[in-house]
Amino acid sequence: MPLHEANGLVPLDAFQAGVRDVCGNFQVLPPQGRRDMRGMITLNRRQALSVAVVENSAAEIDRDWRCIRQDSAEHLFLVLQKAGHSVMRQGDAQVRLSPGDFMMIDSAYPSHFVYGGSGSVQYSVHLNRADFAHRFGISALGGCSIPGASAIGQAMRATIDRVLEAEGALPQQHFVSEAFFNLMGAYLCSLEEGELPTAATSSDLLVARTRAYITQRFRDPDCTPAAVAAAMGVSLRALQRRFQADGSSLSECLIAARLDYARQRLLGQEAIAGERISTIAFDAGFNDLSYFNRQFRARFRASPGEYRLHTLSPSPKGLTQ
């Protein structure tokens, strides 16, 4: 149901709450620092598809790592610009959307939308991230753009319009939803034709995204290899094979991030203050002190206590850096 009337001024907090309820945690910045802005957000559920209609006059909408940590990051958002313009940024991609253009936004990574306060209408197709990856692979994870002028882009645009028109007619909803997924699959098959990163490089992209994810989440003790694989939308076995092909290990990448963090803590001011090693270990994401000690000694050829003593001495060069 509509959060509010599109032509009425609404408090920023009300629109922010509507975005959170429909799309997840995003920060909304109103134009020119005002507390009020024009906007409306609705969510339309059509069997396998849910489409949010977002009208707003925000200056910017942002989703950073803090926002991501506050929700499950389980969606891909296929955003269709219906009216107005916007600039959408995710990772290294920055795309200016004109009416008819698309961009796929991955909720598991930071994103930034710039509207300039001039007014925008967008359709956002909500897709379950894990189901999408299982069905189509990882090519769209991390975000990608779809030029509206392409033949498939035009067909997808018409199909999304039909999705919103198919209220109440269950058979029609089913066939229109299937048409959408078929078109999405056809577009992603263009990987082989070089329109998006090739299938050969998708493995490299997955490993890079996994490493970035671990860098942000390693201090969480629940950030296990299985949890990382689930966040990437692939099976644990498949992700382990990708790392092995890259000459590394998923578990080793996670442990190394935690050990490097612990080492920096031992080198910092906390070492002088006598901070407990167990506190450092648990803050680094380890939940077993004995295991931490073994891994630290194997990596740096000294126990954490010995390492700290050497760092406080005038010449710690005898330890592995």
Image (cartoon, helix red, strand yellow):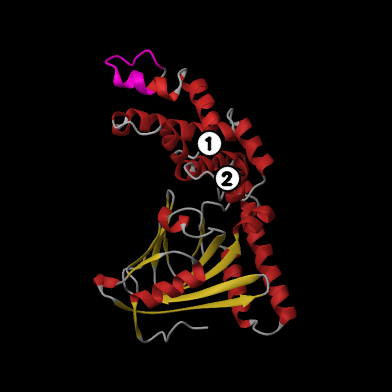
- Amino acid type for the residue under numbered disc 1: Leu
Q: Is residue 57 left or right of residue 45?
A: left
Quarter of the figure that contains the C terminus: top left
Residue 311, quarter of picture: top left
Q: Is residue 61 left or right of residue 71?
A: left
Which disc number belongs to residue 213?
none
Do tag 1 and tag 2 residues touch (Cβ < 8 Å)? yes
**Residue identifier under label 2:** 228
Q: Which residues are magenta?
A: 308-319
- Residue lying at 44% horizontally and 50% vertically, measured from the top left: 91
**Residue identifier under label 1:** 254
Name the residue nearer the viewer: 153 or 288: 288
Q: Position of residue 227 (x, y in %)?
A: 59, 47
Q: Position of residue 137 (x, y in %)?
A: 65, 50
- Is residue 313 in the magenta section? yes
Q: Is residue 149 visible?
A: no
Dot 1: element: helix
